[in-house]
Amino acid sequence: MHKLLRKKILDLGDLPTHIAIIMDGNGRWAKSRNMPRVAGHVEGVNSVREIVRVCGEIGISHLTLYTFSSENWNRPKKEVLAIMTLLLGTIKKEIKNLHKNNVRLSTIGNLDDLPKNSKQGMLDGVEMTKDNTGLNLILALSYGSRQELLRAFQRIADKILLGEMKQNQISEESFSRELYTVNIPDPDLLIRTGGEHRISNFLLWQSAYTEFYLSDIYWPDFREKQLLESIVDYQSRQRRFGRTDDQVSA
Ligand code: FPP
């Protein structure tokens, strides 16, 4: 346990309510060790376990993990199958422990794209933990932000056509309610590991005012220390939401 960093975070205060993570670099982590890419995903699960535990312990309310994007289906079949198997196996193995630790599991994305057993495993986990009041662990699965936005436009258009909504009722609030992230606050901190500097179709609407933290560390090496450092960095920032420094400091 990184006691000093944890104490620093508590002293600085103002924790991010919602942390979102683009877990990148599993393949390169494996390649750098002459291992197959899948070995990187397997080790990545150990990072997931540690980051979930630490977020729960320090009192983060929401943690969203970009687990599988809409575009990841284009990877070689073998890798896709390996990730799906790993995902289902991990959820089945960990769900009791998550439940015991008061973690609520939820998902965003198009679960219908998942193999039947993976989808069912997820739904069972969501159902089992739905009344928990601790960390909300949100797995983005077959998630793409453009697809999510199109789905929201479609849902609004349907409501207008059916007379359930008027055109002048389209607002940021009513639009947000049609996204997968309904009832989830926008992320305060978005971490991307693996050295790339892009958003990759993740939470485009929701990250309008999110603070970004880019780390060169590959996901399997991103553990408690790196997470706590990213939070300390976040705590040093001044969030202005379009206002001036003087306005915010006043
Ligand atoms: C990105 O690294 C990682 C993925 C697309 C898969 C992430 C999935 C896991 C870690 C399993 C998650 C399990 C649970 C329970 C949440 P990459 O393959 O794009 O790495 P590269 O950029 O080095 O190729």
Image (spheres, rainbow, N blue to C red):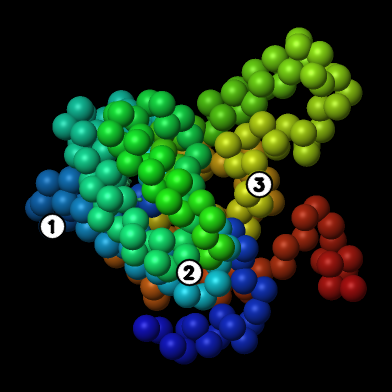
Q: Is residue 129 above or below residue 58?
A: above
Q: Is residue 132 left or right of residue 1?
A: right
Question: x and y percent of residue 202 in the render?
Answer: 51, 40
Question: x and y percent of residue 79 in the render?
Answer: 20, 36
Crowd class of label 1 (few under 14; some 14 to 19; many from 20; radius 10 Å) = few
Q: Is residue 145 left or right of residue 68?
A: right
Q: Is residue 84 left or right of residue 12?
A: left
**Mark 1 or 3, closer to the camera:** 3
The answer to which quarter of the image holds residue 51 is bottom left
Q: Which residue is mark 1?
A: 33
Task: Using the image as rendered, state which of residue 58 and residue 16 is in the foreground.
Answer: 58
N-terminal label among 2 and 3: 2
Q: Which residue is mark 3?
A: 183
Three-letter amino acid code at the position of disc 2: Gly
Instruction: Kindly identify the residue that appears in the image at 76 percent across and 11 percent down.
Output: 162
Question: x and y percent of residue 111 in the render?
Answer: 42, 32
Instruction: Kindly identify the residue that appears in the image at 88 percent across and 23 percent down.
Output: 168
Q: CA distance from mark 1 to mark 2?
A: 31 Å
Q: Is residue 73 above or below residue 67?
A: above
Crowd class of label 3 (few under 14; some 14 to 19; many from 20; radius 10 Å) = few
N-terminal label among 1 and 3: 1
Disc marking residue 56: 2
Instruction: Kindly identify the residue that appears in the image at 50 percent across and 39 percent down.
Output: 108
